Each structure stands twice: as structure tokens, then as C-alpha cells.
Image (spheres, rainbow, N blue to C red):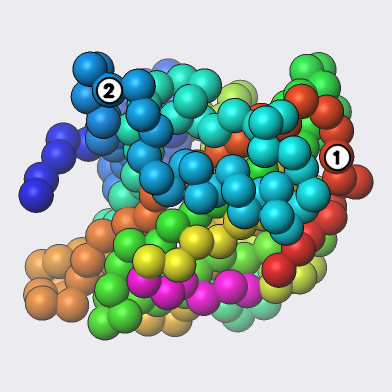
Amino acid sequence: MSSPTSIWKGDWRDQRSTSRNFADYYDCRTHISCGHVSNDLPPIHDLFLRLVGMYFGVPVHGLTSSADTWHHGGDFNLFRFRRPRRRQRNGGLEQSFPHRDTDERAPQPHDVNAFAAVLYLNTEAEASGGTRFYDGEFELDAGADVGQDGEEDIETLVDTSDAKVLAEVPMRFNSLLLYPGNVTHGAWFAHDSDMRFGDSQRHPGVSQWRISQVIFSRPQHQLLPSGALTR
């Protein structure tokens, strides 16, 4: 099965953007629709909402999923490196920009504690890294060569040397990771991720896209303190 996908979060070919997307890496998102004749949500969304209710004590009837709110179907992230990652100050390799899906200072109260989920779709042979959770809000170094004019220009690969890691959850095929959206997090790349999700010409037969489905919910009220994390 194949589906068209598009660039996501900036394009280095746009002179107005400082993003390095499609220059240093490929960061894409695609939507697969259930069809305009169907009013049913994919079963994964129903499961997602039930799990939020089960593990976070949120009434399911008080939640909506991203598919229910915006469009029927599923959203899938696809990522691949175009160049080897650089070394950080602590000697490790660059990581994905730590971020929150929602902000505790958001003007809309119902946005404060949205929940999110990642469904990993890489097989065991393709898997590398997963998702990393951090303590507090990540701040870029002063003078960092990273676009800060808006979310679309935020660089994907950054130095996270000063960020305190709370947990690293390895990806497992067909496993669903569920978390509050106001917890700082980002894709976690292991040492072999450059090969697993790298240039297919440099790593023929090994390199794959990092593929995951992403789901979001929007509860009616603030339910968890900022930074709360359930594993």
C-alpha cells in the first residue's frame, strides 16, 4: 500500500523559513481518510479515548479525538535523516526538539491538558529509539542557530545536553504510548538510528522511514498538573 505524503514544519527551500527540513532530514506527515461516506472513527481512536479514561480518570464522554475534531481517518508521521547527526556538548548525538503538544499557559482552558498517543509502526527489525520525556520546559541555548519565529521554523535536530531526561520509552511494533500533552517530550534516536532511519543509498536494505501514527484528545477541563507523567 502506498499513500502520498507531504512536507511538515517548514521547508529549507522557502526563503522565508529557517527550517532545515528536506535539507538535513525529511519530516513528513500524511493523512489517510476513512472515506467521506463513513461517520465512523477508526477503532484505534475509540481505544485511545477509553485508555485515557482508564489510566487518567477522565470521563470518555468529555473527550474528543483529533480525528473526531478535525477529520475522520488517521495522521501518520514519517521521518528519515538526510545527514549524520552532529555531536552534542555532552558527547551524545543530536535529538529531536523537546516540546509540549499543549502549553499550560494556553489561552484556551480546554487545550491545557490534551492527551496524546503514538502508535509505533516500525517492525522489530526496523526499530530504533522511541520517545523521550523531559523534566520542565526545554529552552534553546542563547544564540543557537535555530529558527524561533514560529513552530513551523523550529529546528527538529537540536542539542539537548542540558535537558533532564525523565524516561525513555523504546518503540515496539504496534504498541501505543499514551501521555499528557503538557509533558515535554520528543522523538528519541538511539546510536543506530542514523543507519535505521538514514540515507537509503548509504544503508541499502537497512534504512527505513521512522513511521508512527499520532492521536490527540481535547478534554473539557484542566485535569492534571503540568508535568504529570503516567507510565
Query: Residue 26: x percent and y percent?
Result: 30, 48
- Give the amino acid at mark 2: Ser
Is residue 204 shown above or below 214? below
Label 2, residues with CA under 10 Å away: few <14, some 14-19, many ≥20: few
Direction right: furthest residue: 225
Q: Work out whether residue 95 can be spotted.
A: no
Residue placed under numbered mark 1 in the picture: 223
State which mark lies toward you, 1 or 2: 2
- The answer to whether 151 appears left or right of 219 in the picture is left
Using the image, tell me which numbered label, if any, was put on residue 38: 2
- The answer to whether 176 appears left or right of 1 in the picture is right
- Judging from the image, what secondary structure is the residue with disc 1 in? loop
Image quadrant occupied by the C terminus: bottom right
Which span is picked out in magenta?
168-173
Q: Work out whether residue 48 can be spotted.
A: yes
- Judging from the image, what secondary structure is the residue with disc 2 in? loop
- Give the amino acid at mark 1: Leu
- Magenta includes 172? yes
Query: Residue 204: x percent and y percent?
Result: 10, 75
Of 137 and 16, the residue lying toward us: 137
Name which of mark 1 and mark 2 comes first in the sequence.
2
